[in-house]
Amino acid sequence: MQINDTLIDDTFAEAFPMKATRLVITAHTPVWANHAAMSLTGFATSVIGCGCEAGIERELAPHETPDGRPGVAVLLFAVSTKELAKQVERRVGQCVLTCPTTAVYSGIDPATSRAPLSDNAPLGSSLRFFGDGWQIAKMLGNTRYWRVPVMDGEFVAQESTVTVKAVGGGNLLLLARDMDSALRVAESAVAAMRRLPNVIMPFPGGVVRSGSKVGSKYAAAPASTNDAFCPTLIGLSPKSELDAEVSCVLEIVIDGLTDSDVGAAMTAGITAAVVLGRAGGVLRISAGNYGGKLGPYHFHLRQLAAGVEGRRA
Amino acid sequence: MRTTTLRVRSAPGCRVGAEQLLPTGLAALTVAEIARIVLPAGNETCAVGDLFDISRTEGDVAALVIEGEVQWLDRLGANLAEGRIDVQGSTGNHTGFRMAGGELRVSGHAGDFTGCQMSGGRLTVDGNSGEFAAGPLPGDMEGMTGGTLTIRGNTGARLGDRMRRGLVLVGGDVGECAASRLVAGTIGIAGKLGPHYGYGMRRGTLLLAHAPAHMPPTFTAGGHGFDVFWSLMVRSLAAEIAPFSTLKASTLPRRYTGDLAVDGRGELLIVG
């Protein structure tokens, strides 16, 4: 399949079950909510080395937040509920509790969640101990909050956050003629994906250059460079999938609350990429998988691209 | 589901216990079976059919409607967990005793111990209530532990005594020792306060729509920086009775904390 002369590989992205939660961080101004969210989602690109994958989902207007202040919705993904709870406690404790004027709430409504619910993860219930006995619990309606005295007033945190069974590891590989084209298409695709709810692209700018494969020649390394897509290894690596025309490959990794969210984001990315097309330096779109044996979620590129507009060949 | 209507036929000369009159239980019975239910009346008993005319209609939820004045009927809605009770008149003591869910509405007045030890659901009294509303039974350690109790009129002494959780809103005046020994939860009072309010208050929130005539000596100015919590509280009260529904997040109340004679982490929020 070719759209606007960009080849869509007959392959699929392979994704995995993860546990996820959404946190709503509010603050006195959007600036401080963003400071906290940026800090919380820092160093959270991959579960391989960071414990979780996290990103800013979107900014929230005051009427969308529990306390009527501007806020930011962030999504965190981890391989287990236990690890997710650990990451939530550490990151909120170090990055939100510490940030002036912030408060934090659970951002998933169990009544409307399309993702299957999992166990709740502690939020205020573990952070409250910072209050050294001065903290106060408050039940408002059916929601329990903790009020922890801090130097600018009170840090308010909902007692726990709802977690769900989610999907991590959806991906697109963008094969381009040169570096400028690769960056341009990756930025365009990420921008299109970020307009959608329930997904994050956890890598810097939403893009990763160090796509990995499982395993390594070195026993201690669980993952290593994806030599099949490294342009410097064309003609050298026996697994190389690149031809001489390709000089840069960038990957976008997508985590979503449901497989349909990930699929929708991948479709948005493909759509943005083929708008640039071959004329814009986008030669191929591919995806990473492990032969379909490891992850239960398979996102076939040609199915996702079936409804994408463009000149077909 | 079925709606059971009990219309008062004749008032007995004694107090009658109404624990058995729960909407879901009655919905499963025929009118004849309901008429044969025996209610305790002091050392005596009396049948529901001797006290009420009974009728039955179909509805969305299991409901019990009582038409007429039943100040002699105690423990109405005791242990209510689901369904709705609508009293078109006044009730006796212990209305909503240990209520855990559902909805109970009294269009008239209620006696003493209204919402005593209730743990869930919504209890609304359009008129006045007696003493010890939302409190414990004498000698028990905990009063109300959940749910919402709304009293549009006045209430007597010891409102919310030993209350631990939940929301109590009073549209009128309250008697002495309101929020005494309050462990936690929220009590809102729109009218005047009797003496000794907040006595022995450990934690929890006492929200006053008007400034009290005097401050308890064991409360201290509670500082600033609680605007996030206030915003959450204002929003949680938006669907409740006035004046609490009209509070503004932008208008911070004055805050005092106490009772310093005990734990001292209770808060007194004065809006007016």
Image (spheres, rainbow, N blue to C red):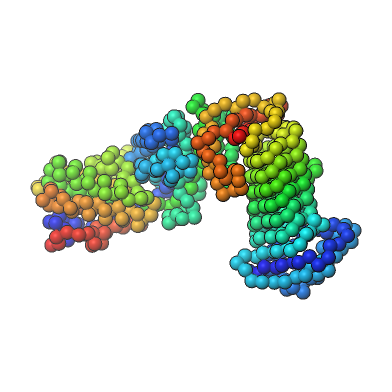
Would residue A200 be found to the left or right of residue A145 on screen? left
* Residue at the (26%, 49%) spot, across then down: A192
Would residue A239 be found to the left or right of residue B44 on screen? left
Compared to residue B15, the image places residue A190 above or below, namely above
Residue A138 image-quadrant placement: top right
Residue A9 placement (x, y as % from top left): 19, 57
Quadrant occupied by the N terminus of chain B: bottom right
Q: Camera-side residue: A84 or B104?
A: B104
Is residue B204 in view?
no
* Residue at the (64%, 48%) spot, across then down: B148
* Residue at the (37%, 38%) spot, across then down: A41
Residue A55 placement (x, y as % from top left): 35, 42
Quadrant occupied by the C terminus of chain B: top right
Residue A56 placement (x, y as % from top left): 36, 42
Residue B219 image-quadrant placement: top right
Is residue A44 in view?
yes
Compared to residue A41, the image places residue B238 above or below, namely below
Would residue B155 be found to the left or right of residue A59 on screen? right
Residue A95 image-quadrant placement: top left
* Residue at the (26%, 59%) spot, across then down: A304
Q: Camera-side residue: B160 or A180?
A: B160
Residue B37 placement (x, y as % from top left): 80, 67
Outermost residue on the right side: it is B43
Would residue A208 be found to the left or right of residue B150 on screen? left
Compared to residue B222, the image places residue B171 above or below, namely below
Q: Camera-side residue: A197 or A303?
A: A197
**Total of numbered circles in the picture?**
0
